[in-house]
Amino acid sequence: MRRFWKNLIAAVGMVIVLQAGALGNTAWGASLEEVRIRGVLRAGVPDFRLYPFAFSENGHIRGFDVDLVGAIAAEAGVSLELVPLSWADISLAWDPSYGWDRFDLAAATISVTPERQKVCDFSVPYFTSGQTVSVLPDSGIHSLEQLQGKKIATPGGTTSEKVARTFFGDPSIVIFHHIPDCYDALLKKEVAGTVTDLATILLEPRVRNGEILVLPKTLSREWYGVALPKGEPELRELVNRVVEVNKDVLYEKWIGF
């Protein structure tokens, strides 16, 4: 009987070890060496318009973030596979259950926050931005105070949503899937204002042609980083080198002010 229990305990222990190993593999993404052996870097980018960081033109995805992940792939000596993602899919990078099996890293105007850093790693920042408010030019609204109690559009699951709720309160917030949807709702007068990222709104064509007015006050200061799996220092160091070398060049190419 004693031998039976000893064998049973050993067997259970082996199962636990195997399960722990499987969970451990799920928790980590591909190492730089594994990416090089595979010969392909799978980079998550937005599948929605996020000009000038990612947008579709003549059937191709272009933009600041796309060029950045292309430079990372080139530095690693591998080809690039763009993985178009919804914002919900992008946010998998800081979901503890994500196994890093769809993409190896993600560049999608992702703001670095302490909460996200607990789950995934980030590169050094490649762009500084913040959250801002936009309204219709003929609305007569010139301050945040005038928007209190009115409907405010913001993309869900983002730092924009967090800032919007802080400034305007939960009852005012109307959630949309993507940033362009917020501007569409504003132009249809379904909401009185939007809270979105400053970098994307300033370069939005509908702002440049006068359809949308950006209020001058910035609600927050944020930094974009490339999201990476935890525990892969060699991959992170390579990405950091690429960011440092390319961020100013890409700024001049895509933003230039």
Image: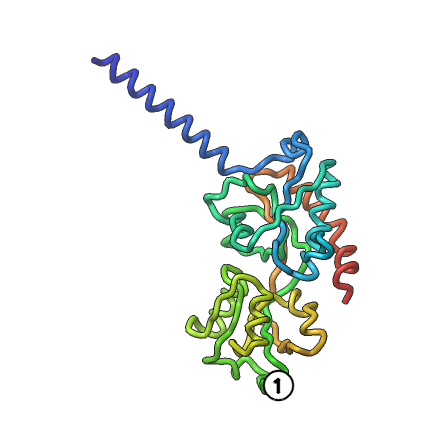
Q: Indicate whether 234 appears above or below 4.
A: below
The answer to whether one can see residue 216 in this image is: no
Q: Which residue is mark 1?
A: 138
The image position of residue 254, as x and y in percent, is 75, 60
The answer to whether one can see residue 18 in this image is: yes
- Residue at x 51% of width, y 74% of height: 152
Q: Indicate whether 216 appears above or below 37.
A: below
The image position of residue 118, as x and y in percent, is 50, 48
Exactly how many numbered labels are in the figure?
1
Q: Quadrant of the N terminus?
A: top left
Identify the coloring.
rainbow
From the viewer's perspective, is 195 left or right of 71? left
Residue at the bottom extreme? 140
Residue at the left extreme? 1
From the viewer's perspective, is 8 left or right of 204? left
* Local SS, label 1: loop
Q: Quadrant of the C terminus?
A: bottom right
- Residue at x 58% of width, y 85% of height: 139
Name the quadrant containing residue 35: top right
Amino acid type assigned to the residue bearing label 1 in the image = Asp
Q: Indicate whether 184 appears above or below 228.
A: below
